[in-house]
Image (cartoon, grey):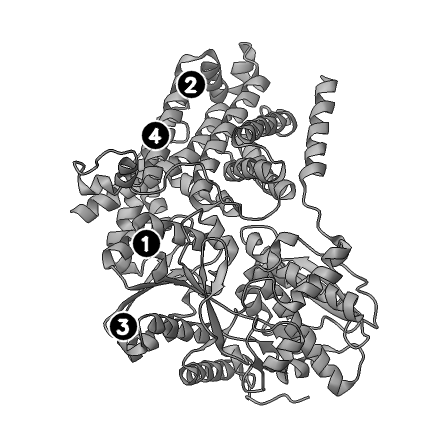
Amino acid sequence: MEFFLEVLIGGLLAGVMYSLVALGFVLIYKASGVFNFAQGAMVFFAALTFVGAQEKLGLSLWAALAFSLLLMILLGVLTEKIVLRPLVNQPPISLFMVTIGLTFFVEGLAQLMWGTKVYPLELGIPDEPVATTIESLGLSATNLPTVLQEINSFDLIAAIVAGVLVAGLAIFFQITKIGRALRAVADDHQAALSIGIPLKSIWAIVWSVAGFVALVAGLMWGARNGVQFALTFVALKALPVLILGGFDSVMGAIVGGLIIGALEKLAEVYIGPFFGGGIEIWFAYVAALLFLLIRPEGLFGDKQIDRV
Amino acid sequence: MKSTKVALSLIVFVLFIGCSESPNTDSVVQDTDASDTQFFGVAGYRVGPYGPNGAPVATGYLDYLQMLNERDGGINGVKLTWEECETEYNTSKGLECYERLKTRNPMGPTAIHPMSTGITYGLIDKVPVDQIPLITLGYGRTDASDGRVFPWVFPLLSNYWSLTSAIVRFIGKQEGGLDNLKGKKIVLLYHDSAYGKEPHQLLKAEAKNFSFDLSMIPVPHPGNEQQSQWLRIKKEKPDWVIVWGWGVSTATSIKTAKKVGFPREKMVGNWWSGAEVDTLAAGKGASEGYYAATLNLAGDHYPVIEDIKEHVYDKGNGGDESYIGTVLWNRGVAMAMLTTEAVRNAQAKYGNKPMSGRQVRWGIENLDLSQARLDSLGFGKMVPPIKVSCEDHEGSGLAGFQQWDGGKWVSVSDWIQGDSDLVRRQVEESAAKYAKEKNITPKCLGE
């Protein structure tokens, strides 16, 4: 039972890391109704800029953070001006295709600017069991159940970061004027324009916020595996999360991440050996697709009702 | 509005100029049309997911060629020229590179190093037709070690089965003798690809020979999430874990091992899971004690490296200086040395002029680099001695072992030979099967 719980908790925490990436997709989808294929590349670009600014420009950690954020905002603004603006009112497939092109451009730009080396990323977050962290603070962890003692501090902090992001974004979308405008734009570009919502500014804002989310995801994933090109692949982990949670739900991204993380880890450990192992990557997609058959809009996605 | 656009354009321009890496274009393309030169086609990868691993190898390779030109005026008076083609470690791009490189000089390329098992498989049927030797040092098709069936393919130094067997012997040594492996539990954590499955056959045979329990756990590509694999390992409590990873997969293995509390001193990577990019990416304090096999030793204390510094880098040429002395850069240097020594060998027979692919093939097949010759070339113990023959295109079968001490790789063993009889038997069986499929009559090609 203890082992089962360990796998389950490990899966839930891994799922939170997927949610961090999925959030960026959700933001863009909510604002423009397009699936941003470039989100993984943005995660890579953000993380590489952060470490590159420290290594090559000699910036301090905080200066590099500010620099990376500025660059992500610049990238967002330029994407709106150069890539999206000419495609206002075009079919969603055109917007989707353009994000594929953007992916390769952003990947190439990142490597051109900062090189192709692997950079370790130390954020000062302890990567050790919670019990060790608690003891290093001069406290006792003996009262905690063993399974909780063994939770990794880094994963726990990543979960807290994701939680804060989700809460912040939920408030942003539900309460603020910009958030409401974002939802209106996502619903119908032309209708939003006709009631005076500044589409261009809204898109620039949302791409900048997605850039910020990419930076957070890039830092957490980079601290886990080092900053390298493979960060672009984290997008693959976010896709089943989005299918399950819904493409336009911030809450769906987090709940979907938790479910996918737990399911794939349990499947790998308990079912994997019967298939020779290595099933988690496709199992997550199978689980998401099965769910799609039951609820096509995802767990928290908006149900589309069209008048015939 | 216009000024904003101009300002934005300027920022982007300045970032491009200020931050972009400046590749040494001189070293990428050099007078490839000259017919009185020895032309080297380099199919490398510096960008993409495996760029961090590929860039030091390609840089080391080109740095050595450049050093020979600067120091010796080439090989016996024949200047060396080269062109690099970016494959991104992608098979289709690698095949395109091959088609391009083979036409870039009247004599064709000296030899091709595809630097990828996938590209190797794509070229095996092409190189005999084009008469271009294929050198696959430390990767590729293992049974190509039988030169009677694969006369144009050279998995020089050691193949994957020799490596696997050497790893078992290394673990046996750590356990106080091969007999002590009985009842021990060993896990092979492998990249779920053709590359990752290469050691299965031989490892199963070794498990039977020494009565140890073997579990094989795949890591799905790209391997940047290994929580469940390591929880399985934690549950199974193995005595050793063999890491057969590549790129991000290796760093993630090391990092996750730390996370679940598995001792790094009980992990042995193969030679593609034992570079600085792997251990550094895993983060501070994660990799100490981790072992890895190697084809070549790390370090910049070899005379040949002093020569490269003096004749290439001190003159403002060369690639990224931070690569010097790393495992993968040294591997690139060693690859270049084996290729140029094959050319020198061929020149001894055919005369001091540019060598054709067929002549270089003979040069590789008759390569004999003793320790004394390696010393005179300035390589010392960086690579093991090698003696290639028609029957044996591997030439050494040795593997070294190194351990990460927190800042660098430290050699912890002499060159270790696996069970060469077992390896040879399996190579010949597999090659014979291939020969039957392709209707090849095994024979030595001679000149």
CA distance separating discs 2 and 4: 20 Å
Query: Mark 3 vs mark 4: same chain?
Result: no
Sequence-wise first label, 3 or 1: 3
Instruction: Using a 10 Å C-alpha cutoff, classify the residue at mark 2 as few (fewer than 14 neighbours), some (14 to 19) or many (20 or more).
Output: some
Residue A234 figure quarter: top left
> Would residue A274 be found to the left or right of residue B386 on screen?
left
Which label sits on residue B229? 1
Query: Mark 2 vs mark 1: same chain?
Result: no
Picture residue at 41% right of the left edge, 66% below the top:
B197
Type of the residue with mark 3 = Phe
CA distance separating discs 1 and 4: 25 Å
Element at label 1: helix
The disc numbered 3 marks a residue on which chain? B
The disc numbered 2 marks a residue on which chain? A
- Residue highlighted by disc 2: A173
> Would residue B124 be found to the left or right of residue A171 on screen?
right
Q: Position of residue B195 (x, y in %)?
A: 46, 65
**Residue in the foreground of this view, choosing between B71 and A267:** B71
- Residue highlighted by disc 3: B212
Type of the residue with mark 2 = Phe
> Would residue B446 be found to the left or right of residue B167 on screen?
right
Residue B422 figure quarter: bottom left
CA distance separating discs 3 and 1: 20 Å
Tags 3 and 1 in contact by the CB under 8 Å rule? no
Q: Which mark lies nearer to you, 2 or 4?
A: 4
Which label sits on residue A160? 4
